Image (cartoon, rainbow, N blue to C red):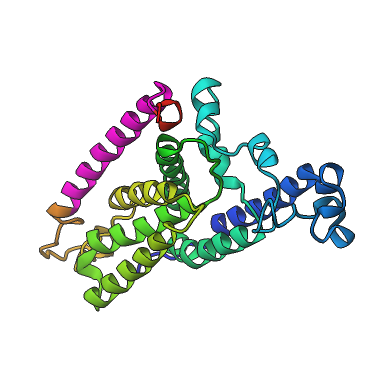
Amino acid sequence: MPKTWFSWLVPLIFAANIMMFVYTMYVNDCPATTGEKCLLSAYLGRLSFQPFTENILLGPSITTLIKLGGLETKLVVEEGEGWRLLSCMWLHVGVIHLVANMLSLLFIGIRLEQEFGFVRVGILYLLSGFGGSLLSALNSKTSISVGASGALFGLLGGVLSELLTNWTIYENKLAALLTLVLIITLNLAVGFLPRVDNSAHIGGFLSGFLLGFILLVRPQFGYVSPKHIPPGYDIKRKPRHMTYQYLLWVTALIILIFGFAYGSAKLFNGETPYNVPI
């Protein structure tokens, strides 16, 4: 039986996002800047939301999001604030945005952490978030990008590549693949709605898809660990991994390193849409 891990990292990420949103609203302090127009100011006070005319998702102002680490390409390129590529994934536009992302995190992340452990899932989450931010910054002109969506799409991408690379151990393979592809397609389709940063979704998904081939590899079906073979037994054992798993691992690693290096070089060299004449 595969080892089952206790999931603590995903709940910790969940709690960190909630606390960061509360802190964001505290810093935002809508009544001090907007006055009586704030939503639910009588009940929430300093934590009340910006008016619907400014933020329909029940959240802070754009100014606050930029102040706390929202991703703005111009600041990354001209001010050297590359840390925003990671900080933006801990911020959310509003309550609706936060709830949608956190439900997805719990639904996908806990199962992954139970199966693969906190180290691999943590790396998958962070690097996917970075990949989403990188593509978003490369494609953005003037918009601000925040949210954990890139990292979450990375988890989805990792689930897909995990299914493909560990194909031999699954039953009902086709049904599982079709279901997963449908879920991914629907989520990507949402990215084409107005004001949704689909570049972050795609960048996160592609990063997670490649990382899944690297981090989420399982032994092939029929593999028996030497420690489970009694002394004196001479049996022909299957290799731990199949040849195609090694090939996918090497290929994914090369593409991922090249993609991150090329994208980072292009971004910090200023080759982005915001400074290209229209």
Q: Quadrant of residue 111?
A: bottom left
Give the magenta range: 245-271
Q: Position of residue 194 (x, y in %)?
A: 49, 55
**Front-lying residue, 77 or 39:** 39
* Image position of 258 (left or right of 184): left
Q: Position of residue 254 (x, y in %)?
A: 24, 37
- Say if residue 7 shows up in the picture: no
Residue 119 on the magenta segment: no
Q: Position of residue 34 (x, y in %)?
A: 82, 46
Label tally = 0
Q: Quadrant of residue 112?
A: bottom left
- The C terminus is located in which quarter? top left
Query: Which residue is at a point 66% across and 37% down the rendered structure image?
Result: 68
**Front-lying residue, 74 or 205:** 74
The main secondary structure of the magenta stretch is helix
- The N terminus is located in which quarter? bottom left
Q: Position of residue 55 (x, y in %)?
A: 67, 53
- Say if residue 94 shows up in the picture: yes
Figure check: 258 above or below 25: above
Figure check: 147 above or below 159: above
